[in-house]
Amino acid sequence: MVPDTPNPLDALLPDRHPQRDFFVCDVADAVLKDLIPKMEHPFYALSKKPDTTIRRYQHGDKWLEVIPSAKGQATIYDKDILIYVVSQVMEALNRGEKVSREIRFNPRDLLMFTNRGTGGKDYDAFCEGLDRLMGTVVKTNITTAGFEDSIPLGDEEETGSFHLIEKAKIRRKHGSEGRILFAEITISEWIFNSIRRNQVLTLHPDYFRLRKPIERRIYEIARKFCGHSESWKIGLDKLLGRTGARTELKRFRHTIREMALTDHLPDYHIFHDAEADQVIFRNRGSMIEVSVPSAWTGHLNPDVYHDARKIAVGWDVRQIERQWRTWLGKKGEAPRSPERSFLGFCKSWQNKRGRP
């Protein structure tokens, strides 16, 4: 009897907020962004258990140390807070708005954006994540994306230390146990400079549906090194080193084989070459790349996004809008009816690619 083929959706967490009100839809449609330097180097713990061990990572002549606080190192789930903040800053930049290192937001929007629950324990976890992010110190000689003034150093070396979040403030109603009204955080200069220099990559929304920390980390590495290329391969032992996971190679090999079987990693298929003991990533063709200025810079009627979601089912319509604007730029002419043109583009997009 031939076993059933695993359904990739079964390996993902459920989409907890498929129906959102309009304003939250705008938040949830912001392009997920992550910082390229942070994706290459393992800043975050892959375990929810408090880890106060100082870690040092070295790739060639580049190194970094992660120094946790007494509450432990920031985890890959705490990183969701920074992904949300980076996404909102990038969205503001794309709209031509002025941005700063201080960002105020409603934590409920963040919880929905990152596919979390919205109960009391989820708000508690958010507050604990802020504590770990503020307490974790990173010391490194990686300067090109980090510090304000980058100058040739010759045979010298420059190092710097920073917190991932410098300050945080939470406003509650009726005291320390009351409902959270808003949060305000100040991100580090290191992270803010990376955003301003556009050293970010788009992440698939299903990143937040990955169940295991190691799966998130493997996706980040694939997104960084495979990117839009057709494929990318790496030795199993080297991939394990890049994840920063503290696990045996034998167990990691089993994890990779399980991921290859379920085939649920966003944006990439994953394979294990047993003979060479290599991991191969192949592009699914689900990513969107935008670079050409649009021939039309006006604003669409907000109601059109509701219709677009019904046409391009499962896709991020804000990303499709960016691709549409790029297409207009290549054509070199503005549409007579922008909304009709955009919906037609969504229909063509869905017909060519189907569900993501």
Image (cartoon, rainbow, N blue to C red):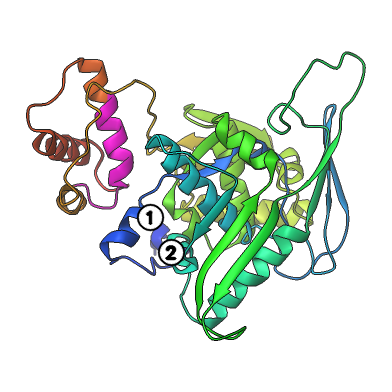
Residue tagged 2:
109
Q: Residue at x 17, y 39 (%)?
A: 351
Q: Quadrant of residue 3?
A: bottom left
Is 64 inside the magenta-drawn segment?
Answer: no
Residue tagged 1:
27
Q: What kind of secondary structure does the magenta stretch mostly adopt?
A: helix
Q: Nearer the viewer, residue 169 or 118?
A: 169
Give the class, few, some or many, for how many residues have Cα within 10 Å of label 1's Cα (few <14, many ≥20): some
Q: Is residue 202 visible?
A: yes
Tell me the SS state at disc 2.
Answer: helix
Give the class, few, some or many, for how many residues have Cα within 10 Å of label 2's Cα (few <14, many ≥20): some
Residue 288 lies, in percent from the top left, at 37, 34
Residue 187 lies, in percent from the top left, at 64, 49
Q: Quadrant of the N terminus?
A: bottom left
Q: Nearer the viewer, residue 344 or 328?
A: 328
Identity, as a three-letter code, of the amino acid under mark 1: Val
